[in-house]
Image (spheres, rainbow, N blue to C red):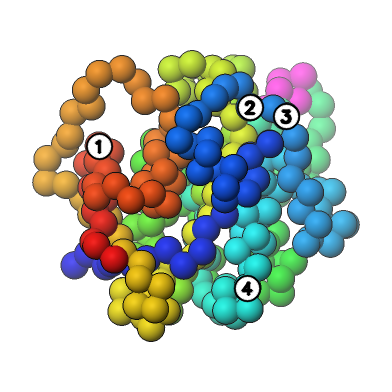
């Protein structure tokens, strides 16, 4: 049975697009290319922070940004966490494969940080958090896969779920697999949401509309040209906007009135 939820807090980060206001403005009129930059990630101890690549820093920056209020911090300190990414730290993996091809030794640290759950693990270690952590990937539907996991956790009784989505441009050797038509439209970015189940007191007080994600019975055929935004950014646009529906392949998003 579908589980309805609402978004209590959200945050997103890309070079030069950091605040909620900046993201709303950019999503209303996307412009490319995006500048270069690295998330400061001042919340994480320096010894750990220096091991993390720009993609991981962006992902963790959005997770930490959700702890801006006491209520959100209390929820995140005890809730399950889902990290979702189509490609993850692929650039790091490709770099190691190139080293192998040249007969060079590999760094154990680089290998340990290349696996799909590495960024989530670092977040857990830094916060001394023993909550339930998951890392998911499902091609162009990776964002939906993350929310499907979150819905399952809410259905099992979780009072909140933190979901983090992150991705970066593919290495040149893998560029042919990108779903984005224009290379200039690929850029490092991450966003995070704190999900709450339907019926919570804070949802009623804030008058937030409820969201639902479920599998459509039939595949939906995309019409027209390729979207200007990637699939996960179209999802973010829907989550923080007021559109009633969003269809992506076999996935159907719906929003109830607030």
Q: Residue beneath label 3, please?
A: 36
Q: Which is nearer the N-term, disc 2 or disc 4?
A: 2
Q: Look at mark 1 in the image and give the residue it sits on.
A: 249
Determine contact: label 3, label 2, CB under 8 Å: no
Q: Which stretch did the figure color magenta? A: 97-102
Task: Report crowding for label 2: few under 14, some 14 to 19, many 20 or more residues within 10 A (C-alpha).
Answer: some
* SS class, disc 2: loop
Say if mark 2 contacts mark 1, CB within 8 Å.
no
Give the answer, above or below, for where 223 lies relative to 119.
above
Spatial CA distance of label 2 from label 4 is 29 Å
Specify which label sits upstream in the sequence, 4 or 1.
Answer: 4
Circles 4 and 1: CB atoms closer than 8 Å? no
Q: CA distance from mark 2 to mark 1?
A: 27 Å
Q: Secondary structure at mark 3?
A: loop
> For this view, does 226 lie left or right of residue 115?
left
The picture places residue 43, in percent across and down from the top left corner, at: 78, 62
Residue 256 part of the magenta-drawn span:
no
In the picture, measured across the screen, residue 107 lies left or right of residue 63, that is right
Depth check, front residue: 154 or 7 = 7
Residue 69: assigned label: 4
Upstream in sequence: badge 3 or badge 1: 3
Gap in angstroms between the C-alphas marked 4 and 1: 36 Å
Which quadrant of the figure has residue 39?
Answer: top right
Q: Which mark sits nearer the N-terminus, 2 or 1?
A: 2
Q: Secondary structure at mark 1?
A: loop
Label 2 or label 1, whichever lies nearer to me, is 2
Foreground of the two, 145 or 235: 235
């Amino acid at each position: 049975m579908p589980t309805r939820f609402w978004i209590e807090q959200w945050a997103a980060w890309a070079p030069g697009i950091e605040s909620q206001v900046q993201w709303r403005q950019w999503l209303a009129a996307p412009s490319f290319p995006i500048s270069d930059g690295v998330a400061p990630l001042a919340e994480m101890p320096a010894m750990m922070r220096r091991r993390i690549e720009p993609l991981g820093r962006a992902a963790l920056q959005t997770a930490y940004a959700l702890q801006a209020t006491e209520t959100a911090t209390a929820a995140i300190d005890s809730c399950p966490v889902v990290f979702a990414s189509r490609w993850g730290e692929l650039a790091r993996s490709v770099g190691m494969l190139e080293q192998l091809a040249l007969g060079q030794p590999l760094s154990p640290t680089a290998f340990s940080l290349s696996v799909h759950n590495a960024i989530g693990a670092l977040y857990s270690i830094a916060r001394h958090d023993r909550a339930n952590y998951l890392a998911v990937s499902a091609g162009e539907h990776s964002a939906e896969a993350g929310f499907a996991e979150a819905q399952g956790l809410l259905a099992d009784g979780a009072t909140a779920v933190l979901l983090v989505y992150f991705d970066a441009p593919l290495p040149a050797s893998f560029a042919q697999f990108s779903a984005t038509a224009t290379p200039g439209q690929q850029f490092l970015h991450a966003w995070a949401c704190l999900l709450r189940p339907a019926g919570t007191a804070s949802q009623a007080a804030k008058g937030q509309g409820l969201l639902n994600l479920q599998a459509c019975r039939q595949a939906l055929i995309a019409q027209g040209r390729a979207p200007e935004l990637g699939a996960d950014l179209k999802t973010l646009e829907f989550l923080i906007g007021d559109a009633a529906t969003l269809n992506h392949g076999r996935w159907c998003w719906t929003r109830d009135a607030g």
